[in-house]
Amino acid sequence: MENRIKECQLDLFADRTSVRSMRANQLRLWFASMAYVLLCALRRIGLAHTRFARASCGSIRLKLLKIAALVRISVRRIKLAMASGCPCRREFQTAHARLSAAAA
């Protein structure tokens, strides 16, 4: 449990509560908590049986979420064009397929 608290503080920047008002600090902690819940769900549903199944939030954020892609937005859909040399392309595709199937 201590490792999860440390992970939330360091990887999701939950320790930065340096604003004067209490409401702003509380909102920042809520956002960090929601980000942690979303990343745990991504790890549990989308990344099961991949090399990121037991990865920390920082690793998932760095290797899967902070990637360069060309975004094309039309009236009906959003298309992401990733580079063919993306090292984690298979895991990204697997997570996308599993999350899409879980949402349907």
Image (spheres, rainbow, N blue to C red):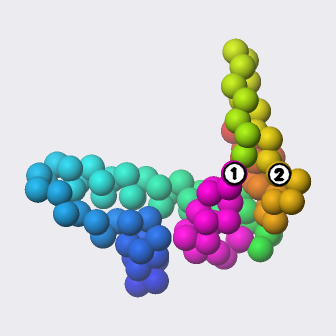
State yes or no: residue 59 in magenta: yes
Q: Residue 14: image x %, image y %?
A: 34, 65
Q: Which residue is mark 1?
A: 68
In-front residue for pair 26/67: 67
In-front residue for pair 74/15: 74
Q: Residue 40: image x %, image y %?
A: 56, 62
Which quadrant, please, contains the C terminus?
Answer: top right
- Residue 71 visible in the snapshot: yes
Q: Which mark is residue 39?
A: none
Q: Residue 12: image x %, image y %?
A: 44, 65
Q: Which residue is mark 2?
A: 83
- Residue 104 visible in the snapshot: no
On the picture, is 22 further left or further right than 46? left
Q: Residue at x 59, y 63 (%)?
A: 61
For mark 1, does the 10 Å Cα neighbourhood hold few (<14), some (14 to 19), or many (20 or more) residues?
A: few
Q: Earlier in the sequence, mark 2 or mark 1?
A: 1
Range drawn in magenta: 52-68
Q: Calculate the distance from the C-alpha at mark 2 to the C-alpha at mark 1.
A: 8 Å
* Relative to 33, residue 24 above or below: above
Q: Are marks 2 and 1 in contact (CB under 8 Å)?
A: yes
On the picture, is 26 further left or further right than 93? left
Which quadrant, please, contains the N terminus?
Answer: bottom left
Q: Residue at x 46, y 76 (%)?
A: 7
On the picture, is 26 further left or further right than 100? left
